[in-house]
Image (cartoon, grey):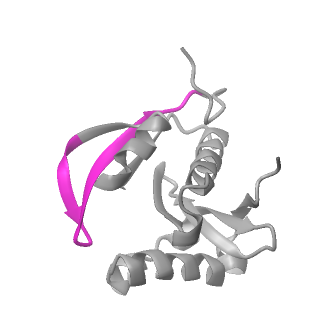
Amino acid sequence: MSRSFRVRRAHWERDREHLRGIREAVFVREQRVASELEWDGLDESCLHVLAEDRNGVPIGTGRLLPDGHIGRMAVLAAWRGRGVGSAILTELLRLASQKAMSEVVLNAQLHALGFYERHGFAAEGEVFVDAGIDHRRMRRALKSRERPGVRRG
């Protein structure tokens, strides 16, 4: 059975409106994050991925900062629980490995800790509030020949 969506590398200049639209829907409208916090000025320096349904309609996104920080992972509500977030994260991990990063970090909303743990991330430090939402920092080591999404051991 083929998936009903695909994930591809996006380019900020070309795909900006699609990427912004998803983040506006999820973070600004749904989670009520202030626009000035969401738009931090870092997008132009990031690698972005975009999930699209089989008709090319944008349904999810995420980004990788040059320092190995994964962020702005967002999936439209109607598509949650269908593997879109896992596919986005797997692609971001692949890009990080391709860039020879030794590890990646992210700030996870507390409700998403289990999701990231299933992808090999470990929580560290105390709970902190970002944009009015409780988070924990998480980290995952990468091996140069690692295939993200494949567990060893």
Q: Identify which residue, 146 or 68, lies in the foreground.
A: 146
Determine the main secondary structure of the stretch shown in magenta. strand
Give how far across and how far down residue 60 sits, in percent. 60, 67
Residues rendered magenta in the picture = 125-143
Q: Find out whether residue 78 is within the magenta segment.
A: no
Position of the C terminus, as image quadrant, is top right
Q: Residue at x 82, y 47 (%)?
A: 1
134 relative to 48 in the view: left or right: left
Q: Residue at x 48, y 53 (%)?
A: 70
- Inspect this view and state whether residue 109 appears: no
Residue 140: quadrant of the picture = top left
Give how far across and how far down residue 116 sits, in percent. 44, 43
Residue 151: quadrant of the picture = top right
Q: Residue at x 64, y 79 (%)?
A: 18
Q: Identify which residue, 103 or 28, lies in the foreground.
A: 28
Q: Find out whether residue 132 is within the magenta segment.
A: yes
Q: Residue at x 47, y 33 (%)?
A: 120
Position above or below: 149 against 63:
above
Residue 135: quadrant of the picture = bottom left
Position above or below: 84 against 52:
above
Counting labels gives 0
- Inspect this view and state whether residue 115 appears: yes
98 relative to 105 in the view: left or right: right
Give how far across and how far down residue 141 sits, in percent. 47, 31
137 relative to 114 in the view: left or right: left
Q: Identify which residue, 75 or 136, lies in the foreground.
A: 75
